[in-house]
Image (cartoon, rainbow, N blue to C red):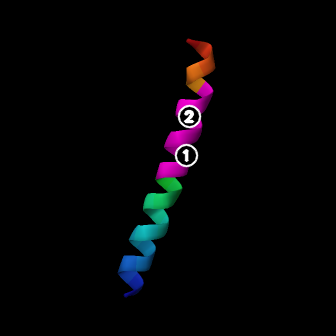
Amino acid sequence: MINIIAITSLSSSWFSAHASLHLVKSPLK
């Protein structure tokens, strides 16, 4: 259970970081 929670939080952290980078890069195009 703890592993699943850790993976889930890591995934959401990576996803929000990736989305933030994408949103930052989009206006630069």
Residue 2 is labelled as none
The image quarter in which residue 20 lies: top right
Measure the C-alpha gap from mark 2 to mark 1: 6 Å
Q: Which residues are magenta?
A: 15-24
The spot of residue 2 in percent (x, y) is 41, 85
Q: In this rendering, would 6 be left or right of 26?
A: left
Identify which residue is drawn at 53% across, 31% down.
22
Identify which residue is drawn at 43% across, 60% down.
11
Identify which residue is drawn at 48% across, 52% down.
14
Total number of numbered discs in the rendering: 2
The residue identified by callout 1 is 17
Q: In what element is the residue under mark 1?
A: helix
* The C terminus, quarter of image: top right
Residue 21 is labelled as 2
Amino acid type, label 2: Leu
* Tag 2–tag 1 contact (CB < 8 Å): yes
